[in-house]
Image: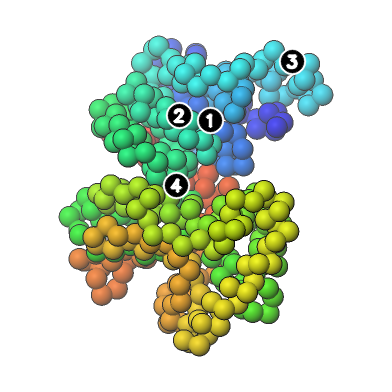
Amino acid sequence: MNICALQPAAIHRPSSAFASSAVRRRRALAVGLIGPGRVGSALLAQLRAAQPRLRESGLDLQLCGVAASRRMWLDCDDPELNHAGHQHHAERAQIWRPGNLDEFAAHVRGDDGRHALLIDCSASDVVAGHYASWLAAGLHVVTPNKQAGSGSLDRWKSIRAACAERARFRYEATVCAGLPVVQTLRDLLDTGDELLAVEGMFSGTLAWLCNRYNGTQPFSVLVREAHALGYTEPDPRDDLSGLDVARKLVILAREAGWLLSLEDVDLQSLVPAELAALPLDAFMSRLRELDAPMAAKLAEARAEGGVLRHVAHLDGHGRASVRLTVLPSTHAFAHTRLTDNIVQFSTRRYCDNPLSVQGPGAGPEVTAAGVFTDLLRIAESLEARA
């Protein structure tokens, strides 16, 4: 990875700023980024572009460091680091430090009482395992990483308990990227509404495949096209299995008060059992084995005058399912476009006409925007508290 391309210099260094009472009055927030991949890089670009406007409004975001899987670097406004040519970067390898999440978090937190926030743009379960201790130490956490919200219930409870004491934990981008799904559900419940059901298309990849699959091309051809376009995960089975969708449904279920685990979701994979454990190359070579069962499902949908859609459902009793299903052509999900995600909340108030949230639910830019929004919400809460 070319670190120079991230150019985090536009986000100012905390050391001198935090010593200034003027900056304290301007709401300074120290930030550390974990996972400078596609989403992390997009987020840094958005922060960089927004910096002048944010400073004018009284918010100083100060990037303290970036941590990758094995390495990290601190005090990212070092001008030599950010402006040296790529050919000089290797010669200055001593600027890197071995990755150490505890050391990284301590550096971002500092010892001067600053407000500090960690952004986890990884997909690592190991990183998610640190959230509770970070929150307990007063570090706010923002993430699109679904591991915490859909993993161990004991860990989830410890995270919620820790953030109830000292810090904020926001995870809007774990469900449908930048769409305000988690916040909408939270607002409904906080205002006393009663949730009756949640139904949605949570996968941009599977939405695209369903929208494109009309029988003129084999399903496997469309999967290969989606893979080439970067819509799927590196291993398309991560999408086709529905596991990622199940994780999102578990996150929403827990937000609604049902302490579900992945094992509680009735999950129907599009990947036959005999292909599930194959090496990736072997799976891709046998991709055509998906064609016949998908053609049969499409024929079933047409016989019923409906369409195929990949749908997650949570009812009012906490029962959860994820499956490919036939919907009537009049259903709202039948009219989605491209990689649209759509979520419908049926509640006591919205019982005759469910409340819907719809829009692009995949891609690094929209996911980064969801993370950015959570960061700004925390900054606003700090201002209100002050």
Furthest toward the left, the residue is 192
| Residue hosting label 2 | 118
- Discs 3, 1 touching: Cβ within 8 Å: no
> For the point 54% across and 63% down, which residue is it?
270
| Residue 151 location (% of width, % of height) | 40, 41
Q: Residues within 10 Å of mark 1 (few under 14, many from 20)?
A: many
Give the alpha-carbon distance from disc 4 to disc 1, as whole Å: 15 Å
| Residue 83 location (% of width, % of height) | 72, 24
Give the alpha-carbon distance from disc 3 to disc 2, as whole Å: 26 Å
Q: Secondary structure at mark 4?
A: helix
Give the alpha-carbon distance from disc 3 to disc 4, as whole Å: 36 Å
Furthest toward the front, the residue is 274
- First in residue order: circle 3 vs circle 1: 1
| Residue hosting label 4 | 174
| Residue hosting label 1 | 34
Q: 247 above or below 359?
A: above
- First in residue order: circle 4 vs circle 1: 1
Q: Nearer the viewer, residue 114 or 296?
A: 296
- First in residue order: circle 3 vs circle 4: 3
- Discs 1, 2 touching: Cβ within 8 Å: yes
- First in residue order: circle 2 vs circle 4: 2
Give the alpha-carbon distance from disc 3 to disc 1, as whole Å: 22 Å
Name the disc covering residue 72, or none: none
Q: Residues within 10 Å of mark 4 (few under 14, many from 20)?
A: many
Q: Tag 2: residue type?
A: Leu
Q: Secondary structure at mark 2?
A: strand
> For the point 67% across and 56% down, which residue is it?
283
Marks 3, 1: nearer the viewer = 1
| Residue hosting label 3 | 92
- First in residue order: circle 3 vs circle 2: 3
Marks 3, 4: nearer the viewer = 4
Q: Secondary structure at mark 1?
A: strand
